[in-house]
């Protein structure tokens, strides 16, 4: 499906996300020829600025954050697509002016009235925004076959199950589910999309993809950065809400889903949903064996001493927000019964490295594997999500020489060396998908709520334990010793990345 002609309206168009991600993404697609033939962008925010000022703002964003450098020859063609309207999101007048501006832009660019509204705004403003859009007649009825209005909603969708339901109710009162695109940028990453290609585009993996042959799975999403300037948000969220509820559970669904019978959005989303439906709840009785949380203490990163989390700007000295979490998760269905999925994510870890590693069971204890004190290493299929995107398979080979000695080697595929380093960024792909009306890589209402249901059990258990301090890990390390113990109790070890 191709991106259809439309105006992209960014609420919060003068903000950080627009500058770093959204505008550079649109710029890259304009260079690569991915934008619809008739297209324009309008930023909407409180700051007083005119179109020219916004073009300068966009230029700075592209110069600093675009994956392709700014091309002076292309710039005049690109900048004429950019427009700006100042206004408050709570003022109905803003929406009247917006409507008029959009009609004028339609005329200039020959756009048939289609709209994509990107809500890059704090969650507290979503309600007033969609309500006002509706009241101003900016949302076409879903039956209107001539035009579309689609709304992209950024995370976080809620803070817990109840607030997520409230957001979804507000969206549902003003829009049809088919007009709502809840973004999870992990689903737009090339390597994440490759999970389905790898599983279902090859013969050799799927027959082994079950409890008979897979011993356990490890999912790591490690970040080297600390909380940075986002303490205002992060200190109320923590790693479980910030990373696991959305990105990591979505990775899990792609690894664990049954083979879908079509690439249609709702077929894929139904299959992902079935995994969420089978997650074993982590109840207060088992929370301490299945979940470890911790906070980074002072340490060393990038050649400098860095402060611990509680000394970061905007964080209170007695904060108990976790910056690291490790979980042991089970999917109670026929395919996965008894196979543990270990998940870990944290800020200020040794390096930025995300991967999914599938550990296969060992060969029988005969021939090469007969000596229990020297077991041969098992096959591991590791999908590296970032930064060295690729896939590697660990296999056993014979070490050259007269003796029969078994040695593990890696078969390696790297995106960079095979396809070059220029994979589109997640936001590029995802915004084009919305323009094309393809919701496959977006979160449906049921997915958001099931994920919260799973997370809320853990949050409830934590709340009832009334903890006053969390285990610490030194900034720049792989996390707390408690997480090592959790996996070692099952006779496994975290992979070295
Ligand atoms: C965001 C989280 O959703 O994802 C951030 O709010 C996190 O805390 C970021 O740093 C990680 O994204 P990426 O693409 O850099 O791995």
Image (cartoon, rainbow, N blue to C red):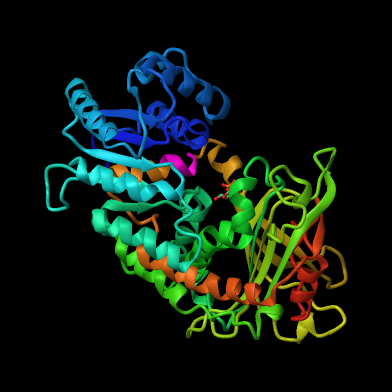
Highlighted range, magenta: 424-428
Give the camera-side residue of 82 and 24: 82
Q: Position of residue 480 (x, y in %)?
A: 80, 64
The quadrant where residue 34 appears: top left
Side of 418 relative to 135 (left or right): right
Q: Position of residue 72 (x, y in %)?
A: 46, 13
Q: Position of residue 171 (x, y in %)?
A: 31, 56
* Residue at 42% from the left image edge and 51% from the top image edge: 183
Q: Position of residue 467 (x, y in %)?
A: 73, 71
| Residue 425 counted in the magenta span | yes
401 relative to 334, above or below: above
* Residue at 50% from the left image edge and 71% from the top image edge: 256
Side of 428 relative to 174 (left or right): right
The quadrant where residue 411 appears: bottom right
Give the camera-side residue of 286 and 405: 286
Evaluate whether residue 460 shows in this view: yes
């Amino acid at each position: 499906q191709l991106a259809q002609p439309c105006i992209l309206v960014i609420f919060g168009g003068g903000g950080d996300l627009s500058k770093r991600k959204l505008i550079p993404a649109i710029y890259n697609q304009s260079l690569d020829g991915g934008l619809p033939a008739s297209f324009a962008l309008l930023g909407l925010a409180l700051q007083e600025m005119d179109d020219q000022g916004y073009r300068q703002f966009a230029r700075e964003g592209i110069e600093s954050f675009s994956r392709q450098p700014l091309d002076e020859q292309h710039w005049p063609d690109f900048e004429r697509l950019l427009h700006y309207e100042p206004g408050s999101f709570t003022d109905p007048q803003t929406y009247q002016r917006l409507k008029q501006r959009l009609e004028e832009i339609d005329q200039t660019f020959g756009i048939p009235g289609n709209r994509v509204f990107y809500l890059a705004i704090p969650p507290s403003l979503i309600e007033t925004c969609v309500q006002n859009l509706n009241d101003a007649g900016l949302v076409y009825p879903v039956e209107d076959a001539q035009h579309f209005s689609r709304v992209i909603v950024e995370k976080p969708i809620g803070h817990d199950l109840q607030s997520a339901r409230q957001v979804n109710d507000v969206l549902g009162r003003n829009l049809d589910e088919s007009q709502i695109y809840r973004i999870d940028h992990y689903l737009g990453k090339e390597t994440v999309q490759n999970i389905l290609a790898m599983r279902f585009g090859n013969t050799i993996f799927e027959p082994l993809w079950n409890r008979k042959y897979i011993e356990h799975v490890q999912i790591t999403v490690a970040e080297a950065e600390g909380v940075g300037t986002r303490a205002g948000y992060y200190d109320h969220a923590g790693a479980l809400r910030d990373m696991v509820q959305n990105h990591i559970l979505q990775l899990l669904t792609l690894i664990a889903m049954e083979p879908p019978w079509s690439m249609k959005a709702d077929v894929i989303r139904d299959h992902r949903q079935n995994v969420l439906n089978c997650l074993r709840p982590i109840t207060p009785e088992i929370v301490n064996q299945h979940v470890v949380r911790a906070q980074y203490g002072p340490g060393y990163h990038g050649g400098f001493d860095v402060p611990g989390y509680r000394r970061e700007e905007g964080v209170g000295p007695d904060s108990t927000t976790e910056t690291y979490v490790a979980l042991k998760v089970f999917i109670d269905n026929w395919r996965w019964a008894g196979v543990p999925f270990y998940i870990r994510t944290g800020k200020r870890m040794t390096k930025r490295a995300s991967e999914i590693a599938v550990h296969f069971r060992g060969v029988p204890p005969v021939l090469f594997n007969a000596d229990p004190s020297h077991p041969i290493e098992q096959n591991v299929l590791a999908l590296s999500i970032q930064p060295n995107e690729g896939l590697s398979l660990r296999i056993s080979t014979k070490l050259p020489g007269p003796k029969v000695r078994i040695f593990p080697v890696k078969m390696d595929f790297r995106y960079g060396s095979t396809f070059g380093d220029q994979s589109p960024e997640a936001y590029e792909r995802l915004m084009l998908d919305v323009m094309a009306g393809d919701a496959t890589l977006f979160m449906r209402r049921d997915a958001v709520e099931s994920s919260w249901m799973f997370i809320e059990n853990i949050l409830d258990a934590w709340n009832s334990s009334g903890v006053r301090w969390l285990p610490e890990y030194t900034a720049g390390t792989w996390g707390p010793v408690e997480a090592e113990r959790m996996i070692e109790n099952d006779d496994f070890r975290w992979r070295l990345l």
